[in-house]
Image: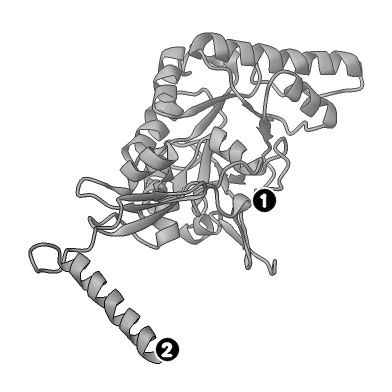
Amino acid sequence: MRKLCLTNLLIAVALWTAVAMGCTGRFLAQPAPPVVIRTEHVAVVTVAEPDSLASLARTYLGDADEAWRIAQYNQVQSAQAGRRLVIPLQPIALGGLRPDGYQVVPILYYPRVGKEKGVSSGTFEKQVQFLRENGYETISLERLTAFLNLSAPLPPKAILITFDSAETWVFESAYPILKRNGFTAALFIPTAQVGKARRIGWKELSAMAAEGFDIGASGVSARPSKASAKKKLEDYYRGVEEEIMLSRKDIARNLNQAPTYFSYRDGQVSDVVIALLKKHGFRGALTQAPGENPFFADNYKLRRMTVSGQDTQERFRQLLTTFHPADLR
């Protein structure tokens, strides 16, 4: 019995050797690994010569801006030909959750950029360069919504830059600096001011929107809409609804895209105002209250960090917190 088993083993080895050597008497080359192995959750890819992280993200994730997901998952900075990379096809760690804490999104608010008051153009450019050189990435309001709704992740250093003005400094000072550095921002405008003296026109707003800048609403007029003892409550809310509804229609008519976010000019946040925003198609709103924005933040009470002309470099860095430590195990 023992001799029979040994004989069978020798026969098996001989057959394997014959197949491997083929007709030439030389061992056949082992087949190369497949270029792509794909499941529902991941794709394992052999990087070809022209591939980059951006091109792989465009092919497998539908968006070149998602290249950070491939880089983060594989702990690489670039795609090298011949290397195998794992591409996560499904979002990982929605909400930026980790065992040691969770992601937060800083929303920076610049009241003014330019010569008079606010942040000077030179300081603003240095701040934007600092963001670029340190790996921060500006995101759109749409991507912020997906993060808050737990439907898509964000880059680990995602931030949002915002302005609440239709004044020309936005287009003449802030916009060129952001564009040079590959950044975008969200601009919230009182629509009645568009095209007036020292104010941006719809042509400029259209150009900004074409470059990926978000154009949001902050009402029709620039005047605060406050309740008072002389004004009936129903008249106050009727006026608020008109500001919300008409400003959204103005932007949709002139830019062919309705705004989805609103900025509270005067801090008048209430359940009724939020209900009106939801009624007229807004998916979120921004306050001027300072604080962090994790995935569980209220979409209609998002917080912003105001950037002042008096801020030091150290103070500016403190505004850029993107992770909140916490023991979530």
Distance between the alpha carbons at the discs numbered 1 and 2: 79 Å
* Kind of residue indicated by mark 2: Met
Is there any visible trace of residue 158 in the rendered image?
yes
Looking at the picture, does residue 119 appear above or below residue 260?
A: below
Q: Judge left or right: residue 30 versus residue 96.
A: left
Which residue lies at the image location 61% right of the left edge and 50% below the top edge?
Answer: 94
The quarter of the displayed image where residue 107 is located: top right
- Please state which of the two labelled residues, at mark 1 or mark 2, is closer to the viewer: 2
Q: Is residue 253 or residue 290 the one in the foreground?
A: 253
What residue occupies the far bottom of the structure in this picture? 2
Is there any visible trace of residue 64 in the rendered image?
no
The quarter of the displayed image where residue 229 is located: top right
What residue occupies the far left of the structure in this picture? 24
To which residue does mark 2 refer? Answer: 1
> Residue 316 location in percent, x, y?
51, 55
Q: Is residue 196 or residue 133 the one in the foreground?
A: 133
Looking at the picture, does residue 128 appear above or below residue 312?
A: above
> Residue 140 location in percent, x, y?
51, 35
To which residue does mark 1 refer? Answer: 291
Q: Judge left or right: residue 9 versus residue 145.
A: left
What residue occupies the far top of the structure in this picture? 253
* Kind of residue indicated by mark 1: Gly
- Regarding mark 1 in the picture, which secondary structure is present there? loop
> Residue 221 location in percent, x, y?
65, 16
Q: How is the image coloured?
A: one colour
Which residue lies at the image location 42% right of the left edge and 44% below the top edge?
Answer: 124
Q: Judge left or right: residue 14 versus residue 176.
A: left
Q: How many marks?
A: 2
Which residue lies at the image location 44% right of the left edge and 23% below the top edge?
Answer: 209
Looking at the picture, does residue 207 appear above or below residue 53?
A: above
